[in-house]
Image: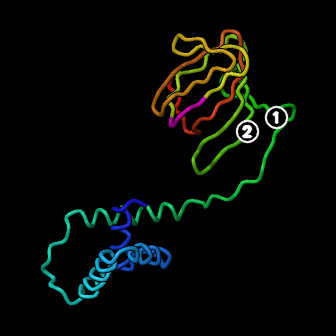
Amino acid sequence: MLPEEFSELMALAALEAVDDEAILLADTYASTSVELEQELAEMRRAVGAIPYGDTSLPISRNLKDRLFKRIATEEEQASQPSAEIMPFQAIRFSEMEWQPHPVAGVTIAVLHTDPVTRRLSALVRCQPGVHYPVHRHAGIEEILMLEGNFVCDGNTYGVGDYLLSGSGSAHDPESPDGCLFFVRTSMDDQYEN
């Protein structure tokens, strides 16, 4: 932790607004110097005096916003499924399940989907002459060319080439000779008419 993060941690520990482990961490950090021990002790005395203090003291204008933002963040994190340790997984190329894609001439073998991040990893095979419709990326898209060629924005990419499209970008690639590529992308890309 950086010194300013410890300063914030000490204040939260004085308020008992963090768990016991964080309070212990703040106490341990404060014990590294007499000045820090005194600062933490003063914070705790001030916190103890709050219920008896002057109610006319001004409250920070953004305190309410910061508090609600922190509560919302904690609720969002609590509502998300906890990341479990994923066991090792292997899929033999010969055992991949190729599915037709909505774009004619394209098949896809989904390797992995993450429902929390809404990302997927897949192999995509395009028949010669496939023209993929314009689509806007909801997140980063990564492509690694494995076979054939792929034309995007007037540039031709072949075996071993890596393409990265940023969130919000759009393109309408094509494959004149057919291709096979690995893709890692968002499940929420938007297709334009």
Name the side, left or right, on which 53 lies relative to 48.
left
Looking at the picture, which amino acid does disc 1 mark?
Answer: Met
Marker disc for residue 111: 2
Residue depicted at 43% across the width and 74% down the height: 18
| Magenta-colored stretch includes residue 139 | yes
Identify the magenta region: 138-142
Name the side, left or right, on which 1 lies relative to 117.
left
Name the side, left or right, on which 152 lies relative to 29.
right
- Quick check: 85 above or below 119? below
Of callouts 2 and 1, the N-terminal one: 1
Residue that sits furthest to the right in the current view: 94
Q: Between marks 2 and 1, how big is the CA–CA gap?
A: 8 Å
Q: Are marks 2 and 1 in contact (CB under 8 Å)?
A: yes
Q: Counting other residues with Cα less than 10 Å from the Cα at mark 1, is it few (<14), some (14-19), or many (20 or more)?
A: few
Q: Counting other residues with Cα less than 10 Å from the Cα at mark 2, is it few (<14), some (14-19), or many (20 or more)?
A: some
Q: Nearer the viewer, residue 161 or 82?
A: 161
Q: Residue 32: horizontal and vertical position, in percent?
A: 40, 74
Residue 2 location, quadrant: bottom left
Residue 130 location, quadrant: top right
Marker disc for residue 96: 1
